[in-house]
Image (cartoon, rainbow, N blue to C red):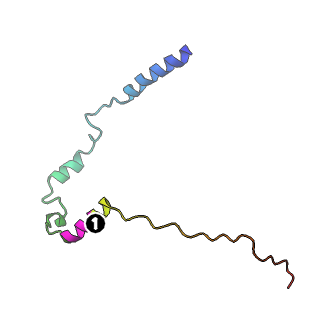
Amino acid sequence: MILILCAGALSGCAADYLNNYDTVTLAAGDTQKYNSLAQTVDPFNPNAKNTHIEGDGTRAAAVAQGYKFPPPPPPPPAITVNVGGAVNNGAN
């Protein structure tokens, strides 16, 4: 029991030891990519400047109301159970 407790206590220290890195951040090796993006004239997608959103408020309000007050679920399908009835033993 003592051995299991000691192993559990030391495993927490091992996890903390493995979180130490030799770099400042995990992305420290991406300087070439960073410099190329920093020197790009316009790095954004041209469609990002489009402020005209297609659609109207009435449709958006109807969708929001549909989420706020969802329609009731459809009724379960009717199940027909035949009890008794004619038995056909192959004799006509």
Identify the main secondary structure in magenta. Answer: helix
Indicate the position of residue 30 as horizontal and vertical percent values: 26, 45
Task: Assess whether residue 32 is covered by the magenta stretch.
Answer: no
Residue 52 vs residue 24: left or right? left
Query: Measuring 15% from the left and 67% from the top, which residue is drawn there?
Result: 50
Indicate the position of residue 63 as horizontal and vertical percent values: 28, 66
- Work out whether residue 5 or residue 88 is closer to the camera in this orientation and state it: 88
Indicate the position of residue 87 as horizontal and vertical percent values: 80, 76
Residue 87 vs residue 26: left or right? right
Residue under numbered circle 1: 63
- Work out whether residue 53 or residue 19 is closer to the camera in this orientation and state it: 53
**Residue 64 quadrant:** bottom left
- Work out whether residue 79 or residue 1 is closer to the camera in this orientation and state it: 79
Tell me if residue 86 comes above or below residue 19 in the rendering. below
Element at label 1 = helix
Residue 11 vs residue 77: left or right? left
Outermost residue to the top = 2
Task: Assess whether residue 63 is covered by the magenta stretch.
Answer: yes
In the rendered image, which quarter contains the N terminus? top right
**Residue 40 quadrant:** bottom left
Residues in magenta? 57-64
Query: Measuring 51% from the left and 18% from the top, which residue is drawn there?
Result: 5
Query: Measuring 18% from the left and 67% from the top, which residue is drawn there?
Result: 47
Query: Measuring 50% from the left and 20% from the top, which residue is drawn there?
Result: 7
- How many marks the image carries: the answer is 1
Q: Amino acid at mark 1?
A: Val
